[in-house]
């Protein structure tokens, strides 16, 4: 191909599922352009716009966008003989974000956040002009030699949507960048682009996608599973970075950022070392509850993927059935063995009961206005905590239906820290703890504080959200642990902050009490 309309083709730039892109010269104006060639079917039902009509309509809409971060569309052409359609765009010398990420090395945090800022600014402009991208991914983001972002292919995903669902999925690229509503065929709005932007942000900050696997697995994870916290994979990231990503990736659109401008405000806060301002409205803990918001519809998969999924499901069912039968047999054998042992061990005469002295009555606790002393785990360390705690009760055997009292032990090396424990939106414990300066002959620098107190795990709790913050905003860490504590009387929830890292988990004695 040497000529497209009045444009002289210079070379082919690339090929993809959506068509071919050429570098061409405009002899009239004397400038270089990029021309994307699409092949669209013209047929349509009565009263239904065809793909070519949709093409021209969307090309005109995208052509009205004029922003430094968006590739400008100069012209849209139709060739009735070849049944091809052309989009003439400005030529951008540079590389795609996809090629940069594949070539490595991993992007520095500041550079990644600057690229995301430029993407969000371009999306904010497009969304205000009622244009949704629908196919935001690294291959559609160009970077100039001085790292200026240029987003291309605005509106193209909608142009090809008339061609059929199976082809649309293929044309829109890898499903790893789709939003839950795209996967389930739901209504699309600007928040769908923000979800895709969250995946891009995760990829650039961590070096891997938040949802990995084959096509069916990726679609399932996008709809049902939460990603791993970015700060767990990149220790340079803080809780603020986690919030930016998880807020974009919220499966419930009501919890997602309402606009790219709201994201940009939070991004500026994080880059300045402040907590995101919108966290006051949507707390961090609400982004990690794992709610299923799309259970009414199933993800779109091809027939081949459906067959593979059914095969895996059948294998899992058979494996589960075999395991269940084996478990029943083992339990039955155990019950029989226990009964036989009781018959042999039963004494011929009853043993007199041992008298047990009743426990002395406990004096009622005195009320304190705001703070109560904590029992420290060593004589060298002590602390105080504020906040109210549930009253202690006797441990029970059920972990899910009845509330349990366990011991909380937490330690930190901060001057002052505030600990918050939640189950969903229910507050289990909140309190502040001042650090104690290290002592001894050498008087080491820093602080070392440890304390313990009982807490009540509410009935029905499945997970506990843990957050430790410094009042001066220098540290904000979050984590989650299972609320299903081991059934030992000595079950202890241990929370520790050391060298800027939060570690939380259950600790038990070596053997359960008889």
Image (cartoon, rainbow, N blue to C red):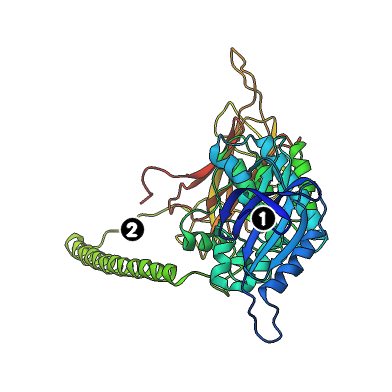
Q: Position of residue 374 (x, y in %)?
A: 63, 39
Q: Identify the residue at horizontal 61%, vertical 43% (top origin).
A: 204
Mark 1 in CB contact with mark 2 (< 8 angstroms)? no
Question: Which residue is identified by label 1?
Answer: 3
Residue 169: name its quadrant.
bottom right
Compared with 408, 1 (above or below) is: below
Of marks 1 and 2, the one in the foreground: 1
Q: Counting other residues with Cα less than 10 Å from the Cα at mark 1, is it few (<14), some (14-19), or many (20 or more)?
A: few
- Relative depth, front residue between 511 and 344: 511
* Local SS, label 1: strand
Question: Which residue is identified by label 2?
Answer: 353
User: Mark 1 or 2 closer to N-term?
Assistant: 1
Counting labels gives 2
Q: Report whether 491 appears left or right of 230.
A: left
Q: Report whether 353 appears left or right of 292.
A: left
Q: Position of residue 227 (x, y in %)?
A: 56, 52
- Relative depth, front residue between 164 and 442: 164
Q: Position of residue 147 (x, y in %)?
A: 71, 37
């Amino acid at each position: 191909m040497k000529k497209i309309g009045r444009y002289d083709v210079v070379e082919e730039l690339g090929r993809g599922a959506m068509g071919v892109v050429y570098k061409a010269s405009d002899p009239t104006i004397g400038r270089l352009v990029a021309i994307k060639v699409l092949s669209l079917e013209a047929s349509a039902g009565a009263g239904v716009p065809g793909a070519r009509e949709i093409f021209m309509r969307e090309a005109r809409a995208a052509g009205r966008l004029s922003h430094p971060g968006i590739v400008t569309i100069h012209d849209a052409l139709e060739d009735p003989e070849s049944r091809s359609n052309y989009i003439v765009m400005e030529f951008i010398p540079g590389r795609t974000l996809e090629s940069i990420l594949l070539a490595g090395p991993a992007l520095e945090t500041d550079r990644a956040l600057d690229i995301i800022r430029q993407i969000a600014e371009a999306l904010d402009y497009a969304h205000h002009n009622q244009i949704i991208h629908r196919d935001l991914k690294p291959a559609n983001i160009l970077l100039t030699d001085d790292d200026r972002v240029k987003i291309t292919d605005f509106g193209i995903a909608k142009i090809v949507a008339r061609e059929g669902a199976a082809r649309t999925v293929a044309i829109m690229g890898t499903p790893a960048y789709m939003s839950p509503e795209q996967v389930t065929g739901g209504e699309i709005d600007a928040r769908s682009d923000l979800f895709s932007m969250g995946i891009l942000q995760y990829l650039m900050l961590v070096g891997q996608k938040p949802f990995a696997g084959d096509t069916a697995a990726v679609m399932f994870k996008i709809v049902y599973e939460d990603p791993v916290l970015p700060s767990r994979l990149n220790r340079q990231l803080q809780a603020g970075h986690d919030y930016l990503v998880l807020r974009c990736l919220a499966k419930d659109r009501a919890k997602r950022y309402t606009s790219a401008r709201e994201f940009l405000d939070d991004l500026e806060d994080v880059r300045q070392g402040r907590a995101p301002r919108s966290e006051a409205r949507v707390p961090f803990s609400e982004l990690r509850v794992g709610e299923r918001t799309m259970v009414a519809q199933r993800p779109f998969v091809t027939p081949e993927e459906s067959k593979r999924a059914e095969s895996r499901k059948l294998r899992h069912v058979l494996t589960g059935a075999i395991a269940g039968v084996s478990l029943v047999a083992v339990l039955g054998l155990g019950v029989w063995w226990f009964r036989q042992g009781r018959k042999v061990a039963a004494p011929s005469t009853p043993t007199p009961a041992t008298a047990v002295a009743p426990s002395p009555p406990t004096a009622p606790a005195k009320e304190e206005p705001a703070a109560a002393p904590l029992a420290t785990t060593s004589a060298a360390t002590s602390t105080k905590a504020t906040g109210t705690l549930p009253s202690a009760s006797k441990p029970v055997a059920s972990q899910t239906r009845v509330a349990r009292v366990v011991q909380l032990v937490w330690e930190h090396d901060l001057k002052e820290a505030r600990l918050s424990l939640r189950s969903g939106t229910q507050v289990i414990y909140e309190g502040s703890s001042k650090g104690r300066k290290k002592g001894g002959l050498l008087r080491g620098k820093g602080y070392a504080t440890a304390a313990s107190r009982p807490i009540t795990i509410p009935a029905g709790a499945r997970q506990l959200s843990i957050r430790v913050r410094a009042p001066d905003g220098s540290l904000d860490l979050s984590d989650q642990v299972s609320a299903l504590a081991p059934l030992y009387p000595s079950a202890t929830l241990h929370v520790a902050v050391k060298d800027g890292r939060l570690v939380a988990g259950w600790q038990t004695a070596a053997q359960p009490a008889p």
